[in-house]
Amino acid sequence: MAAALATSFFTAAALGAAPAPFPAVGSVVVDFTPPWLREWVVGQFGTSDKTVLFVCLGATLAALGALAGFLERPRLPLGSSVFLLCGALGYAAVWAEAPQPGWRSLFAPLSAVIVGVTALRFPLGLLRVRSSSEPGGPEGVPLSRRAFAASLMSLSASGAVLAFATTKIDRLRSLGSERAATLLPRPTSPAPSIPNGATAPEAVPFVTSVQDFYRIDTALATPALSREAWRLKVFGMVANPLELTWADLAAMPMIERAVTLTCVSNEVGGDLIGNAVWSGVPMALVLAEAGPLPDADMLLSRSVDGWTAGTPLSAVRDGRDAMLAVGMNGEPLPFEHGYPVRQVVPGLYGYVSATKWVIEWEITRFDRSKAYWSTRGWSERGPIKLSSRLERPGGSVRAGRVVVAGSAWAQHVGISKVEVRVDDGPWQEARLADEYSADTWRQWWFDWAAEPGNHTIACRAYDREGRVQDGRRSGPAPDGATGWHEREIQVV
């Protein structure tokens, strides 16, 4: 099974015509995962959710490989049928997930079946070898267990080497040299400098590094799309359908803005949120050129891997800095974050706005079209909810002065106040760091005279329109979690 799996990866990477069967099956699993189960997995494992999925799929394939070896017999090779079934399922998944499925999509699963059946029958054939070197001797001597295990280990090692080589091919195909050579267009409207006062004592960095920025999406195999191949088609309810190339985009006026993004799956106090400096073309410019019809109210964006998001047109045209981003923290977008072009829309959860590897805009209406997650029970419009979290301290601290710090966010509205409560005491106002903009989180801190014992600290935020953070506990589905973040602190 290891040899078959490695072969499928190698063939898919060499041809580049379709995703490998393994991640394609994983994508189908994600597509049909009930919202409550996806919410639980993301809540438990966060950005490691894909790793958990791959481990589960790998364990399933290992069990199927063991079953194939058990079923294979000299006269009735049922074990081979296990590989045929896996190949058929893999091909069906590739056909369902490939942006443009074709006859070449068959090569990866077919090669996996051929190698898998061959690798299955080879060591079993060795078990049936009989020695006839001595006339009149016994009919034969079975292969030793040690030799049989060695043959299996050699097959596994070959699969590992092939998988490693495939990784190298994928890296070459993922256009690393092109990205490294990409020069971002100079923004005509650069981001204001970030003042030192925007960072609160003991809080996380105001700007999240690329390495630490969360990633939640349905792409189990990171799409590899070159600048030359990238196109954005704008069609549907528009007066002037468009097709933009990278050169067209690079020639348009660009802006640079710090914007906080968050995932709708973020639990209260979770880490599926980050603040970065993005550069790109205002989406409103492209929309204005296309000319949406008066009754259109939805921008249905599509990723190169087929994922879709439904963004309210009003959120793109109301003056906020919604952009087709090409840069993140001063460098070209990382592949995992949407290279070469993605969307960034302040104030909306990512599932309705932050399409990575974006290649299509269909201008339509919410009563006519549905996006990926809205067909799975999540709300359609996804405005980010007013929220806050505790970041320091954690665990155990010494008695005396302790800095309690965190972040609060109300994108496109702004934070006016944060309060902290210790145990059942009164709410006390925290000190706010300087506000950078209404589209970024705002950091805060509170000086606590900590006394020995076990304590519970909670926080809540107010936005600039006078609303207070909802204290009722609810999970992320269907439109974002609510509740005050609390931490248990031991003071010694």
Image: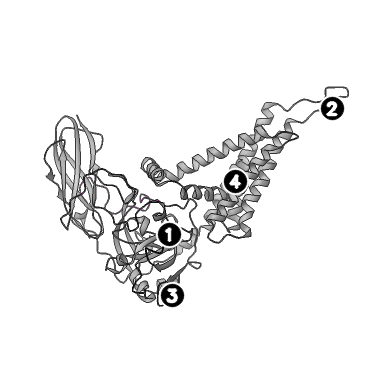
**Residue 82 rendering spot, x and y as whole percentages:** 64, 40
The image position of residue 119, as x and y in percent, is 68, 40
Q: Which residue is mark 1?
A: 308
Which residue in the structure is indicated by mark 3?
A: 241
Which residue was labeled with disc 2?
Answer: 133
- Disc 4 versus disc 2: nearer the observer: 4
Name the mark nearer the viewer: 2 or 1: 1
- Horizontal side, residue 33 vs residue 478: left or right: right
Q: Please, what secondary structure does the residue beneath circle 4 have?
A: helix
Count of picture labels:
4
Q: Is residue 216 magenta?
A: yes
The alpha-carbon separation of the residues under discs 2 and 3 comes to 79 Å
Residue projecting furthest to the front: 367
Find the distance from the CA under tag 4 to the CA under tag 3: 43 Å
Residue type at mark 1 is Thr
Q: Which residues are magenta?
A: 199-217
Q: Report helix, strand or loop for mark 2.
A: loop
Quote the CA–CA distance across marks 4 and 1. Answer: 30 Å
Which residue is denoted by mark 4 in the rendering?
Answer: 6
